[in-house]
């Protein structure tokens, strides 16, 4: 399978990441079908196509993936696109071991582009992160978590072949704009009062409840300031969420 890992991205950014991606037929097709619409939508939301950076939020219970963007000289992000998750796997709560069918929850970033995916196009997430390695099953954590096309999943986020095309284009453009990595936060749900009551009804371990507390802090900070908080990991798997 042809992956473009983070190290490969940095190497390609010295030349032209987009040019290299366009060598693949599915990426070329995505640009032919979606690029004009991508450009129009960016412009509509005040984002400059050659100057914006991305942030992605995934909400499992709500079945939504959000794309937020900002121009490099701006501080605040703007919501400019939403995608429906078309199939679900597992239940609320983090992924803790290989084969549990869970979609992860936590603070991540995109670390791979796969233009020849079994699921049309896909973008890999750096699961397991530091917290997962501390709290999950040692040496049995699994991996290969993607946002991808198709409409099937055993722990990933599928948004259909049609929708992954524009999603992939937005992400290629951001990396081509020299964004070092695209942060992705996986939430159990939108951390609003009505959803908190629902997710707190689930019988979960204290570790999961602690994770949700840490995710809520990041959620509230971002919703309040439209800026990304600084995320760091503690030795017990918890997080420090602080102002950048």
Image (cartoon, grey):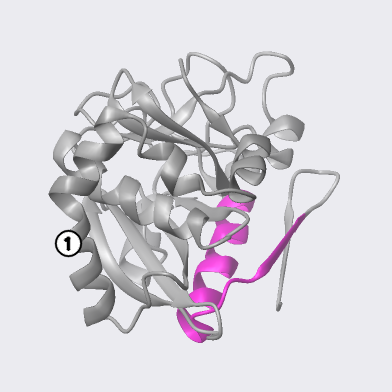
- Relative to 4, 163 lies left or right: left
Residue 87 picture quarter: top left
Write the start and end of the magenta stretch as one range.
210-232
The question of residue 216 being in magenta is answered with yes
Look at the image and say whether residue 149 sits in the magenta stretch. Answer: no
Give coordinates of residue 41: x percent, y percent. Answer: 21, 71
Q: Main secondary structure of the magenta part?
A: helix
**Depth check, front residue: 9 or 147:** 9
The picture places residue 134, in percent across and down from the top left corner, at 76, 33
Q: Report whether residue 85 is seen.
A: no
Give coordinates of residue 55: x percent, y percent.
Answer: 47, 62
Q: Name the residue at 58% across, 60% down.
A: 178
| Residue lying furthest right | 235
Q: Which residue is mark 1?
A: 36
Q: Could you tell me which residue is drawn at 23 percent across and 24 percent down?
A: 152
Q: Secondary structure at mark 1?
A: helix
| Neighbours of disc 1 within 10 Å: few (<14), some (14-19), many (20+) | few
The image position of residue 139, as x and y in percent, is 72, 14
Up the image or down, 181 lies above or below 138; here it is below
Quarter of the picture containing the C terminus is: bottom right
- Is residue 211 left or right of 54 when viewed as pictured? right
Of residue 48 and residue 218, the one placed in the foreground of this image is 48
Q: Nearer the viewer, residue 144 or 73?
A: 73
In which quadrant of the rendered view does residue 10 lie?
Answer: top right
In which image quadrant can residue 37 be found? Answer: bottom left
Q: Is residue 164 above or below residue 57?
A: above
Which residue shows up at 37% across the image and 32% down it? 23
Question: Is residue 121 positioned above or below 49 on the image?
Answer: above
**Going by the image, does 86 lie left or right of 141?**
left
């Amino acid at each position: 399978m042809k992956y473009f890992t983070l190290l490969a991205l940095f190497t390609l950014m010295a030349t032209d990441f987009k040019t290299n991606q366009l060598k693949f037929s599915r990426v070329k097709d995505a640009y032919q079908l979606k690029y004009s619409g991508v450009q129009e939508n960016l412009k509509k939301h005040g984002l400059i196509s050659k100057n914006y950076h991305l942030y992605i939020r995934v909400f499992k219970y709500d079945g939504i993936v959000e794309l937020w963007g900002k121009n490099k000289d701006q501080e605040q992000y703007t919501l400019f696109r939403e995608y429906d998750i078309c199939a679900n796997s597992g239940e609320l709560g983090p992924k803790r071991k290989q084969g549990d069918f869970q979609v992860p929850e936590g603070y991540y970033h995109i670390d791979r582009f796969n233009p020849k995916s079994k699921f049309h196009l896909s973008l890999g997430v750096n699961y397991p992160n530091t917290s997962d390695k501390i709290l999950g099953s040692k040496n049995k954590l699994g991996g290969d978590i993607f946002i991808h096309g198709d409409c099937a999943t055993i722990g990933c986020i599928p948004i259909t072949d049609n929708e992954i095309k524009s999603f992939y284009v937005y992400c290629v453009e951001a990396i081509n704009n020299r964004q070092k990595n695209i942060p992705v936060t996986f939430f159990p749900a939108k951390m609003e009062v009505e959803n908190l009551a629902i997710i707190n009804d689930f019988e979960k371990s204290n570790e999961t409840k602690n994770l949700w507390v840490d995710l809520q802090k990041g959620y509230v900070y971002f919703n309040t300031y439209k800026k990304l908080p600084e995320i760091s990991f503690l030795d017990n798997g918890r997080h420090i969420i602080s102002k950048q």
